[in-house]
Amino acid sequence: MSALLIQGGRLIDPSQGIDQCRDVYIENGRIRYEAPAPSVEIETIDARGLIVSPGWIDCHVSFREPGNEEDETIETGAAAALAGGFTAVCSLPDTFPVVDSRASAEFVVRQSERAGKCRVHPLGAVTKGHLGEELAEIGHLVDGGAIGFSDGKRPISNPEIMRRSLQYTSMWNRPILNHAQVPELVHDGVMHEGFHSTVLGLRGIPASAEEIMVRRDIALAEDTGGRVHLMSISSMRSVEEIRQAKARNIHVSADVAPHHLLLTDESLASYDTNLKVNPPFRTEEHRKALIDGLKDGTIAMISSDHQPLAEEKKSLEFDHAPFGISGLETVLPLCCRALIEPKHLSWSDLISKLTVGPANLFEMNSGTLANGAVADVTIIDPNETWTIRAEDFLSKSRNNPFDGETVQGRVKYTIVEGEVRYRQEEVSRLA
Amino acid sequence: MALSYKFSCCDLFLMSDSNEVTARIERWNRRHLLGLQQLDASEVELILDHAAYFKELQSTRVKLEHLNGCVVGNLFFEPSTRTKTSFSLAAKRLSADTIDWTATGSSVSKGETFIDTALTIESMGVDLMVIRHSSPGAPELLSKHLRAGILNAGDGTHEHPTQGLLDIFTIREQLHTLVGKTVTLVGDIKHSRVARSNIWGLKALGANVIVCGPPTLIPPEIERLGVEVAHRFDDVLERSDVINLLRVQFERQRGAFFPSIAEYAHLFGMNRSRLKQCRPDVLVLAPGPINRGVEITPDVADGKHSQILNQVTNGLFVRMACLHLLAQTQIREKGVE
């Protein structure tokens, strides 16, 4: 018999309202606060100066397997997730083939178990082939392990399909995660429509493309009683719509990506394709509104919106390169810079966006360090200064615009089901 | 790469160009010409002055040797006839060797990235690369990968600096100054790289700029560039010293930005009756190729106010000036044998 003692750390568990220095034990894969029997051998992690948090959960990442293993596999993606402090992630179904059947959902679960890193929960497609036309076999997908439903980066455009899928999924009380955009207004836009798209001559995506879809989804959530989650929102008016809808007790939630809290459309002047993301970086007032949405709880979670892309795909002209940032491994330092350093959020508030928020969305039992809970734990050094080096990513892809930047806040240990699966110092030594 | 630039014509060059201009040429230190956004007034003026010098020399019929030993690559990822020909001739007039490379039928269609294509051509010993591409920012991206000097010959809807410069050269030649002059750009501003380059250059030299077109073809917040926006062509005719009629970019538009060509011509076409409302000495420019009967009627295009063919002529000298200035930087960096 052996146990793990995490000693001397600052324990922050928003699920229990705890923020204090406290030792915590892990025994038989469970959280314990009382010391094990004297016969038990104890390994100790010295957590003095560190923050001990429930394991983080990312509500949508893209792991590209099967079909695009040149970008990422479930194994490399899960390794990147551990390095980013995540003990569980939900993977979008936009693989090839699409996760729209029980077998394909079970494949994700199986690969995740084989990898033995973080847990990877499949999100099932809402529609067959994520083509937006007919409902996928949602019941079968639930049996195969689908934790929620999404058509990935393809907006569920037809309102009748969206309405019906909200009605249907309510049988299992599972959320629908929509990429809220009106496709006709996006068309082949590549950046926020505004002054900078005018100067750069790049085709714009107006903020209204998102806002209209957010309003529609809120109306349908109210109509059906279904649960709508809006992925990676970018517009200030979306935040306001969600704020009002929540006040009316409509089942709507939203997340935001850390890079949207730091960058604006002005940054695109370099035409760096690593800055090409969907939704696009918008203006300063939108950026500030997203932070305000996090502060007042309108936005209850943060997702990396991890979109790994092989180098050859990003080495194209700006308007031909695909959208996305390989973001799992930089969530903490970016959140530090955007939210902690300017004192927009407390550590407890930030950790809540990475634990309680997504756990509530999927009604997971995790995201807590309650006595007896499954021991998913993330231990971070809030003060460590380091330099992001995309070449050292555990993700297969390096498309991250923050490469080379010196940042603060580093994940030190990631523990899944009581097992230490990531030790930063060990991984860095090998790199 | 062994370079052997010869400047046997330098004597002639020094005789004809004033010492003051020569000194300014020596101070030019840009490796690339990606757009007019980056240039200040003195840089724009230097290019124009240097182009004027080449224009003067034209009458001597002497083949110049400013780029002797230099290799200029014309790398066109998008079809072009006039710009490519003009660059090619400009390089030849200065005794450069030229490579013409058009992307259609080349490795781009075989899946090679445009960066690899450009690196391949550069490896043949190219010193200056003239790039035309349908994607905004493509020359900028290449400038990060290549050692050659890059001259943007039009990148999507972003910039077309030499077209902007030749328009401004033509105006300056006729009006002697840009300060306080009102230049109206008419038509599809949204999809026009020519408009963007004109705006930066004209504003740098102190002109007033009006952009005029239907709201669907005026890009958002363009006022922040210091231009006035108008939607009724007739309202601005009288105030304009120069009217530059942009081509309707049928190939860059997706969907209908205006209901019909006939309606466009009715609202924004330059014709005889509109010309009568203009100042008697108004200059009418069009970057071409012109759609006769759409943005301009044939009688105006061929009339005495029209600068269309002067623009083409001046384009050669502007491009000679740009090539020479960028070659100077290359020579300085690589050294002359």
Image (cartoon, coloured by chain):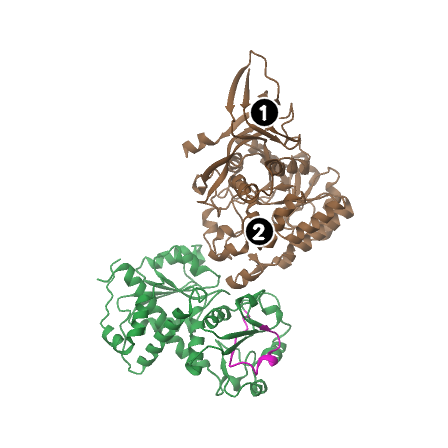
Chain colours: A brown, B green
Question: Looking at the rendering, which quadrant does residue B189 occupy?
Answer: bottom right
Q: What chain is tagged by disc 2?
A: A
The reply to whether residue A260 is in sight is yes
Q: Quadrant of residue A348?
A: top right
Q: Residues within 10 Å of mark 2 (few under 14, many from 20)?
A: many
Tell which of B223 and B34 is nearer to you: B223
Asked if the magenta segment contains residue B244, the reply would be yes
Q: Position of residue A209 (x, y in %)?
A: 64, 56
How many residues crowd around disc 1 within 10 Å: few (fewer than 14), some, or many (20 or more)? some
Q: Is residue B9 in sight in this rendering?
A: no
Front in this rendered view, residue B45 or A107: B45
The magenta-colored residue range is B229-250
Helix, strand or loop at label 1? It is loop
Three-letter code for the amino acid on which mark 1 is drawn: Arg
> Vertically, is A180 above or below B82?
above
Q: Which mark is residue A278?
A: 2
**Mark 2 is on which residue type?**
Asn
Nearest-to-viewer mark from 1 and 2: 1
Q: Is residue A177 above or below residue B296?
A: above
Q: Position of residue A94 (x, y in %)?
A: 59, 45
Camera-side residue of B301 and A237 = A237
Please state, as top left, top right, bottom left or bottom right, where the N terminus of chain B lies in the image.
Answer: bottom left
Between marks 1 and 2, how big is the CA–CA gap?
41 Å
B321 lies above or below A424: below
Q: Is residue A207 left or right of residue A162?
A: left
Reading the chain from its start, which is encountered first: label 1 or label 2? Answer: 1
Return the mark for residue A22: 1
Q: Identify the residue shown where x is 49% and y is 39%.
A: A408
Q: Is A37 left or right of A269, judged from the image as shown? A: right
